[in-house]
Structure formats: C-alpha cells, structure tokens
Amino acid sequence: MRRTAVLTGGTAGIGLETALGLAAAGLAVTVVGRNTDRGARAVELINAARPAHPARFLRADLASLDEVRSLADRIAADHAGSGDALAVLVNNVGAMFAERHSYDGVEASFVVNHLSPYLLTELLLPTLQAGAPSRIVNVTSGAVGVAKRVFDAVEPPGGYYGFHWYGRAKLANLAYTLDLAARLDGTGVTVLAADPGGAATDMTDHMLDPKIVSPGLRLLWPLVRRKFRRSTSGPASVAAQPSIVAATDHALAGRTGVVIGPQARPVAAFRPAADPRIAAAVRRLSERHAPLTVA
C-alpha cells in the first residue's frame, strides 16, 4: 500500500523544504498551493531528488473555503478504492497581513491560518481514519504569545495589528489541534503541532513594518525587529525540520497532542491553548464560520 502525504502551502520556503523531507521519508507527496507555475517548479524539485514515489501538485486557493471543500472532495475521491492510504496531512499554509483584508466577509488572517486548515482537516478525517495509523501536523508559531485570548467573534476588539491577529489565528489553531488530539485519541490518527521558529521567507518581510504591532509594542519594535532579523536568518530547510519530525519520526508513533518545537524536539504547549474554555470558544467560532456541510 502506498502511503501518501498532503501538504498545504508547499510550493516555496518552509513548505517546499517540508515536502522534500516527506518525499525523502518515502511518502508520495501531494503539494497544494494557489500558483500553478510555482507548483510545477516544486514538483520538479521534489522529483529531481528521485523519491520513491513521484510528487504531484493540486491547485487550490486556501483563502476560499469553497475551494477548501473542493480540495477535500478531490483528495478523498483520489483515495477511495485506490489502495493508497492518506498517512499524513500537514497544514503548513499561513499568511500575515499588514492591512486588514477579508475573504467572503471574514477577516483574512483568521481564514488562512485557522478556518482553512480546520475545515480541510475535518473534511479529511474519514480518509485519514481509513489510512490509519496516520498523522495530522498543524504548523504553529511563537506569535501565539501576543494574541488576544477572546474568541467570541472572528475579530477581536481594538485596532487591526497584523502580527497580533496572526498570533490570535495561530492560537485558535493550536487550541483546535490540542482539542482534536483528545477527540481522536485511540482512533489511530495522531495530531501534532510543529513550531518552525524563524526563517527567512516571504512572510517575514511584514515583520519590518511597525504598523503590524500595537502601539504598546511599537516603542520596542526596533529592538524586537533586530532580534527578529537574527532569528529569521536561518535557512528554510532548518525551519522545516519540526514539521518533518512531527510527520515521520517513528519515536512519535501513537503520541498525540505533542508540540514539536524549533529544535525539532517535543516542547510544552503554550498553556492558554490547552484551556478548555478557549478550545470550546474556538470550536463554536469554527463551526459557525466554516460549517462542514453547506445548504
């Protein structure tokens, strides 16, 4: 039986390096992205390493929940009756916005960083369970530490600051990850989070703009920015290691609810993400804005 991996946001940067690592581990990799040319280049790079199974690319704009649903349908159909097992789902896609945007009326950062991976994961659970033992890996971020911990609505009170809103969406996703791990315990599907730490990628360019942080942090931003430049100077190949370890390390077999830190070792989860009240609020918000079935 061929074991497959689906990786979102895998056409460049950390995602592409993760795809290369999954392919090297013997998985048949499907890379998901919105740009067909970049997808073709990613597949060419992966296949140039002569993996055991050729990679493929599926186009989907994961800012659109309708396209997420179509993607899940396509992946589920591909695996139904094929003999292939969906062994790994890595929700790597992420985005930070310097200015407020919305997709279908919902704030963009929350859509891309939480609702999209939440919906794709939930829709693919039957396929993942059929392919068990299998793993779900959700990419998290240290930005959860600056997040407002209120999830009564998609948008928190106050002004828009991209870094904080990114962190809040990632906190929602981490809370969902830990909650899902408990829900699926014993099913053969393990759920992990991976924190890549810092790397020089397209998204880190936003970190140079002081408008992305609240006024209280803005005074300290020159110091934070210098530290950030140092911490994001490493290669994406190193930052991909936590996701690769979470997805493939045999020592993690059967372990669920584990966070793999930037050093590619298990670390303690950010405590608020394990708060059942936050998990319940995130669950209600997710179900409201990304229903699993549509009328």
Image: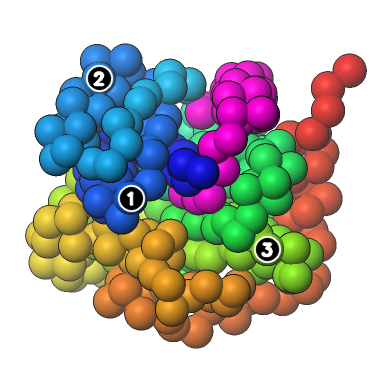
Query: Could you say where residue 193 lies in the image, as x and y percent from the top left?
Result: 50, 64
Location of mark 2 (residue): 40
What residue is rendered at 62% in x and 48% in y? 131
Query: Could you say where residue 114 lies in the image, as x and y percent from the top left?
Result: 58, 46
Q: Earlier in the sequence, mark 1 or mark 3?
A: 1
Residue 225 higher or lower than 208, as above or below: below
* Display colour scheme: rainbow
Q: Earlier in the sequence, mark 3 or mark 2?
A: 2
The label on residue 188 is: 3
**In the displayed structure image, the side of residue 103 where residue 91 appears, left or right:** left
What residue is rendered at 18% in x and 55% in y? 237
The stretch drawn in magenta includes residue 65: yes
Residue farthest right in this picture: 295
What residue is rendered at 65% in x and 60% in y? 189
Cβ atoms at labels 3 and 2 below 8 Å apart: no
Q: Is residue 49 visible?
A: yes
- Region rendered in magenta: 62-90
Quarter of the image with the C terminus is top right
Query: Could you say where residue 195 lies in the image, as x and y percent from the top left?
Result: 39, 65
Q: Residue 10's image quarter?
A: top left
What residue is rendered at 78% in x and 53% in y? 283
Amino acid identity at mark 3? Gly
Q: Earlier in the sequence, mark 2 or mark 1?
A: 1
Q: Is residue 107 visible?
A: no
Residue 134 higher or lower than 15, as above or below: below
Location of mark 1 (residue): 26
Query: Could you say where residue 229 lies in the image, as x and y percent from the top left?
Result: 13, 61
Check disc 2 and report its element: helix, strand or loop. helix
Amino acid identity at mark 2? Ala
Cβ atoms at labels 1 and 3 below 8 Å apart: no
Check disc 3 and report its element: helix, strand or loop. loop
